[in-house]
Amino acid sequence: MLIRKLVEQADQRSGAGEGVPRYYRSRPVRWVIRIDANGDGSLIDLVDPVQQPSPYLTRTSGIAAMLLVDTLEYVLGIAKDDSDKARNGADRRNDAFLALLKSWRDNTEDPAAQTVCRFFEQERHLDLANGLPDDAASSELVGVMLGESWGHMLPSAVAFWAQVARERKSSGGEGICLACGEVGPLLKTVPEMVKSSLIPVGVESNGRPKRGRDAALISVNTSAQGRGGTLQLANTPICEACGAKAMGALNHLLADEHHRRRGEDNVLTWWLREPGDFDLMVIERPEPADVKALLDEPYRGRTGTSVDTNAFYALTLSANQSRIVVRDWIDVPVHDIKNHLAAWFRDHRSTDRWADGYHCVPLRTMVRASGRWDRSKKQYVAGSTIHGLERDLLRAALRGTPAPPHLIPRMLHRIRNDHHLDLPRVAMLRLALTRPPYEEHVMPGLDEKNENPAYVWGRMFAVLEAVQRRALPDLNATIRDRYFGLAMTQPEATMRMLRTNANGHIKKLIGKNESRGAGYALDARLAALSQLIDADKGLPGHLDARGQTRFILGYDHQRAADMAAARAAKEAKNNGDHTAD
């Protein structure tokens, strides 16, 4: 199914005029051998390599030249180093390149092939090699141009290279292709690998991405991997046309920034059965208008508006050495993925201390917030995120599944250690508590009717912190800095101690004219919150993981509501003063 959908995508792209020749890949060409009408050649350094679709097949082993565009080692015989082994290898690779040019000439009547072969047979390319700078790497690509035209883009070169590719990759047998269902020549191996740069393989401790390898979508090169001990694609029959289309489409999608989402050690690529305006990157750019459109999506059919009948496909990949790991494959109607994304935003959106209303969080920001918080730098430590969380959250967003079971305990551990709480962390906790196995009705903001003891205790802790801050504005360490971890786990003992201290702070506030009103107001809020707690049971002695999560949500919701009220009061005061003027 996956291969078939990639083939369909390749046909759609080709029909839209966006295709490149089969068995061609966009690669950076640094050097150009330009042959003029007289057969004379010159070597041009482009300095900044030019991305050029050029003949390409995966070099699994041995020597295999590419037509007209290859490395300096193949085209000019430039050795990797000065050793005899490297020089012999470069000579053999150059011989293979020349042999491929002669085969192109012998199988076509194109005069261009005659001109190119004559230039190389006269060994003029060796003179050009002598003019290379010492720092030229043998792996840099060089192409051949005839005047102002690329030789490898000539119709005869494109057709000949396709023939070469079929011969190199063919199994030599025929059968029914799993993708198209037609009988035809079958492939021995996949015709092209996914470029190393297209699949992330993780980051170093300093935050820099690791270097990967080219990877194969299907690789069976030992008897232990194949069914019945068979090798290569014997158990995955794919015809030459479908194999080339599928791998070309996959590389194209992974290279298209409008159809991919790169993570730390995975990449998601998606496409639609038919072209449409749906953009999955709303998950990283949750603009209010786009989120609202998704939240309204389930009601479109009820109001007589047509429902999108298009299909959505998504593929999540990671790499293990030179093999691709398919982490997830999604094939659903577009309206289903829209509903899942709507639920994703609905289940995690929360209030923020610094802005009014409910706010959704980019998935990448959530993942970053799972790391350690560096107080001195006021940022999350690079490379410290929860391993595998990105894939788990991505799956939850696209499939509507629960958050990973380890999310709550891991996040509680982080918060207890660094006492840092922000919108992304709160959003993840709310998401986990809203979905199975908990399935609690958690408001995105302050729930004044919620009488859950842990939630109420979180609200009380926020008010106690406000009391201390108002009474001791110059204090370096607040009760959150000193007692937040204890308050998360042992509410009864912590509340008794902090409430006693708060009484002294409130008495101090009431004793001053400038703070008397605030003192009475804070005392009244604490009294009102105390009324929500069962007088007989009181606060629990200990809180489990679910209770600690409720405590954090209550604390954050109260803080956000207090700051929103302060902003509203300030704005009302300013508007009043302006009116008075």
Image (tube, rainbow, N blue to C red):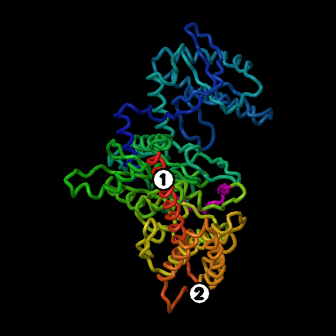
Question: Between tags 1 and 2, which lies in front?
Answer: 1
Q: CA distance from mark 1 to mark 2?
A: 42 Å
Q: Residue at x 45, y 76 (%)?
A: 438
Q: Tell me which residue sits at (42%, 45%) in the image.
A: 186
Q: Which residue is mark 2?
A: 541
Q: Which residue is mark 1?
A: 571
**What x and y, as percent, mark residue 108?**
46, 21
Q: Which residues are magenta?
A: 378-390
For the residue labelled by badge 2, is the local secondary structure a helix, a strand or a loop?
loop
Q: Earlier in the sequence, mark 1 or mark 2?
A: 2
Disc 2 residue type (three-letter): Gly
Please report the residue visible at 69 percent of the width from the left and 18 percent of the height from the top.
128
Horizontal side of 313 relative to 411 (left or right) equals left
Q: Residue furthest bottom?
A: 536
**Direction from residue 543 to residue 285 in the image, left or right:** left
Q: Residue at x 67, y 64 (%)?
A: 473
Q: Magenta region's main secondary structure?
A: loop
Q: Viewer-proximal residue, 466 or 524?
A: 524
